[in-house]
Every structure is written in structure tokens, then in C-alpha cells.
Image (spheres, coloured by chain):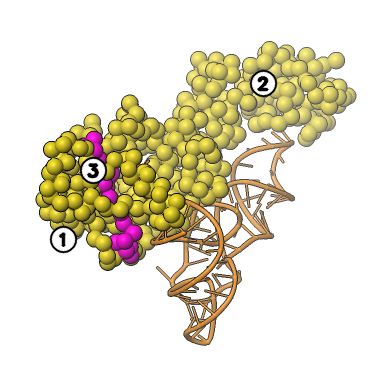
Amino acid sequence: MTQQPRVRFAPSPTGYLHVGGLRTALYNYLFARRLGGTVILRIEDTDRSRFVEGAAENLASTLAWAGLHFDEGPGIGGDFGPYIQSQRSDIYTAHAHQLLEEGKAYRCFCTSEELEASRQKQIAEKRDPAYDRRCRALTPEEVQKRIEEGMPFTIRMKVPVVGQMHFHDLVRGEITVHFDAIDDQVLIKSDGFPTYHLANVVDDHLMGITHVIRGEEWLPSAPKHQLLYDFLGWEAPAFAHLPLLLNEDRTKLSKRQGDVAVEDYRNKGFLPTALVNFVALLGWNPGDDREMFTLAELEQAFSLERVSKAGAVFDIEKLRWFNAQYLRALPPAELAGHCGPWMRAAGFDTGDNTRTEAVVAAFASYLTLPSDIAAHLPFLTIAQVTLENAEDRLLLAGEDAQSVLKRFADLAETQAPWDAETVKALIKQVQADTGIKGKGLFMPLRLALTAEQHGPDLGMMAELLGRDTCVRRVRAQIT
RNA sequence: GGCGCGUUCGUCUAGCGGCUAGGACGUGGCCCUCUCAAGGCCAAAACACGGGUUCGAUUCCCGUACGCGCUACCA
């Protein structure tokens, strides 16, 4: 029987969407789409102390911005809800009590302070910090007495004391762990909420999750989860632990060393297509030399078999390259849409769509981010050209330069129509009339017109400036 | 410290016993062009180390080193 895969992305709403989270969400999404499966968004908000208002909504909208759309989840619906863990408390409690009754879990009355003290002592004695399982030995009478006294308690999983277990990881293969390395994990906290371990196992089972695709930081606790499935008499889903995203110094990608929030990249003008394409290739490759992928193409090409094992450094330079590629491939109207805010901030009036689009099209190949457009606008926004550079002034003062400027101004005065092509023809005429060509012909004009030595096609620049401005600026440089 | 995972150019990676170790970003050069950007071409640049196994190891096994992760009533 081949069942359609059901996968989930299960972030905790503690703020923004981390780029590593985006990558995890993406791989889940691609895996499911490729196989015609279902993608579920589940909010893991069992830690009330870390809850951030609005974070869940922000997560969802950022994911949507990236183009990832879920089949089930909060605000989407589905037959396995609710999809917010804080609304599923009784379900976790019921399963924890079942484990209690079956002798697979026990109540622990130790306080956080006691546990911390014990931990410190163990560290001081150079022993491995681990819960000493003192409450595991409590008699039923003692337990009953403490409950009646109203002592708060947690519920801990009764991990076998000896032996070892295996589990299979789709990325890493067979993994063996000895039970003595596994603590008696807390399942239900003293506030009544479940820990990640219990909630994730219960939900994954109840929601019919077939494949758990998550970050490598979860690898060490996978055996606990496997054990929980066994305790509950459930078949565990397949596991796939993805390699981590790293800082330049190869530590786990974190704030402090650059932007880690998807929103940061979004706000800077990175396109979702570029970010998704880039992040898809961090830990996965198609097996051939392709590297430009749309989401739809990724859906076709993705497979867990080609996910690599080692962590990947988040190389912002390559992301920038991807962004430049996608940016310049945009239709002018869309490019103008992205650049608009920056252009207005730079004093350019974007009221005329045709003109705005012509400007961004002229500079498309110069842009890595939409904000880069601002640096190219001064020639359009300044009142007149003033050459700061002595070298430039010298260049314009030359005899040849002056005759080029004069001839151009004379011819331009009556030129109509005025567009890139006709201006170029006009420059050709200047060349024929003055015998000056190449750099000596273009540079004086470029400087007089734009105040810059470098830039796009001069004919295009002249068109954007308009005939009258061109004539005025060129005449202004004639001595 | 313990446990787990990992290790091919600076970075992302291909490679699944025999290759001049391939591609991409970045870097350098050349070409194109009035110039710059883009684009094209070329170049420099890697199998962590030590043992095995094998006719032959980047590839398989073991060890070492290094890195990362986990080691919470956080996820």
C-alpha cells in the first residue's frame, strides 16, 4: 500500500521566521508536492513563556510571501485540527495519563530549583548531568500523598535503564543510541502543558504524519520520540534530519552574525524567488548542473535522497547573485514596482509609469537589490551638471571636446523625434562632422549630460533626459 | 565532559573503486563596448590526517584531529 505522504512544518511562534525554518518548510513542501501529498502547518506554542503575540500570523504571512501554501493549518482548516498545540492540551494530558497507567511514565515532584542544584553538583563532581530518577522510585502511597498535599509535578517518561535502540534516518541511515544516554524526559510540565517531545509525537500520529522532516538539532532527541511511539503502540513516521544552516564561522546560523529572519531579507528587497531558489540549494542539489529553479521546477526535481549530510554556510554573496539574476529578469513594470519606493525616496517622481519603467529598464543590469537604483538617479534629479572632478573638467575643456559639444548642441536643437536611436544617429553625425570618434566623442557628451564617466548606453541616457535638458546641459559646458 | 552527527576548491556542491576530481558564487585575466554594468571565454583554487581492505582508493572499514549539534519543566 502506498499512501500519500503527509508532512508538517511545525514552528514555534517566538518571533520571526528563521531562514533555516524557511528551508525546512520548503523541503517539507517540496517533498509533499512532488508526491502529491499534503503539507500541514502546525503551531507549537506549548511554551507560554516564549509566546510572542502575532508571531503565528507573521509566520504564516511570511511563508505565503515565499510562495509556500499549506493544505491544512490554522486559518486554513483541515480534518485533523486544531492545528495550534495550546488548543490541544487535553489530548496530551490524556495520553500522558495513559502512559502513567501503563507504567511507562511517572510523576516527578522535583522542583526546578532542586533539579538545577542537582545538575550543578553533578557538574562540580565532573559527572554527566542527568536526572537522577529519584521520583521514579516513589511508592504509589508516597505519590498519592504528595498529590493530596497539592505538590506540583511533572510527568516523566520511563526510559529503559539498559540496552540500546536503533532508528532509521532517511538522510543519515541507521543510528544507534544507548538508553543510558537518554534522560527520563519530561512529558508534561508542571503548568500542565506538554513538552515538545510529547506534543510532537502525539500530534504527528494523530495528524497522520508520514514523514518528519526537520533540522538536525532534533537528531539527538529522535530516539526519545521513537521510544514514545513504541510506548504508545504507534508506528513511528519516517525521519529525515536536515543539515544545519551555518554562519560564516560554521556555527549554527544565528542572529548577531547577520540577518537570519526571512523578513530582514524581504525588507531589503530580496525577491522570494531568489531566496527560495538559494535556500533550496543549501543542502540539496538536483544531481545535474542546473541551479536556476522556480518553485514549480523544484517541486519536480526535489527528493530527500539528494539531501546532503553536512551543514551549509549561508553565503550571502551567492544569494545576492541569485537576486540580481531574478531582478533583471523581471518585466519592467514589476521591476519598477520593486524600485518605486527607493526612487521616490531619492527624489524621482514615479508618476509617469512609462518613464519610470524606461529608467529601471536602463539600469536593470546594475541592480542587485531594488535599492541600488537610487545610486543611478542623480543625473535625472539634479538641476544642472557640476563636475566635481578636476580631471573631468579638464577633459571637457579640451579643443576636441568643445567641438563635439558645439556640434552636438547645434544638431540637437532641431532634432525630432528624440529617442535613443535618433540620438545615436545624431552622435554619428557629430562624428562625421568633427572627425572625432570613440572615447573622445562619447566621453565629453556623457560627462556633460550625466556628470558621470560610466553608465548605460548614452543614447538611452539622452532619451531619458529629453532633448531640451540635453541641449541645455551641453551648452552649459561650452566655454 | 558525555552522546550523536559531520569533514571534496574561500563558499554551495557533483562524485556512489580506475576521472586531466566537474559545475556555480566569489577572485584574477581576456573579449565585447564610448564607458560601466550585464554577457562570453580563460585561469588560479579542494579530496583533513594516519592506518587498513583492494591490482587500484576522494569513494569501503577503523582510528585520530577538527567542526557542529544535543545534553532544560525551550523548541
Quadrant location of the C terminus of chain A?
Answer: top right
Q: Residue at x 51, y 48 (%)?
A: A251
Label 3: few (<14), some or many (≥20) within 10 Å?
many
State how far apart marks 1 and 2 are (Cα).
68 Å
Q: Callout 3, which amino acid? A: Phe
- Verify whether residue A180 appears in magenta: yes
Q: Which quadrant of the view contains residue A437?
A: top right
Labels 1 & 2 near each other (Cβ < 8 A): no
Is A41 or B31 nearer to us in this picture? A41
Q: Position of residue A377 (x, y in %)?
A: 62, 22
Chain B: give its colour: orange
Location of residue A183 (image quadrant)? bottom left
From the top left corner, tell me how far across and down residue A41 is, in percent.
27, 39
The range drawn in magenta is: A176-201
Q: Colour of chain A?
A: yellow
Judged from the image, the secondary structure of the residue bearing numbered disc 2 is helix
What residue sits right under mark 3 in the picture?
Answer: A109
Mark 1 crowd level (few <14, some 14–19, many ≥20, 10 Å Cα)? few
Residue at horizontal 23%, vertical 43%? A109
Chain identity of mark 3 = A
> For the residues carrying marks 1 and 3, which lies nearer the camera in this image?
3
The residue singled out by tag 2 in the image is A379
Residue at 59% over, 24% down: A374
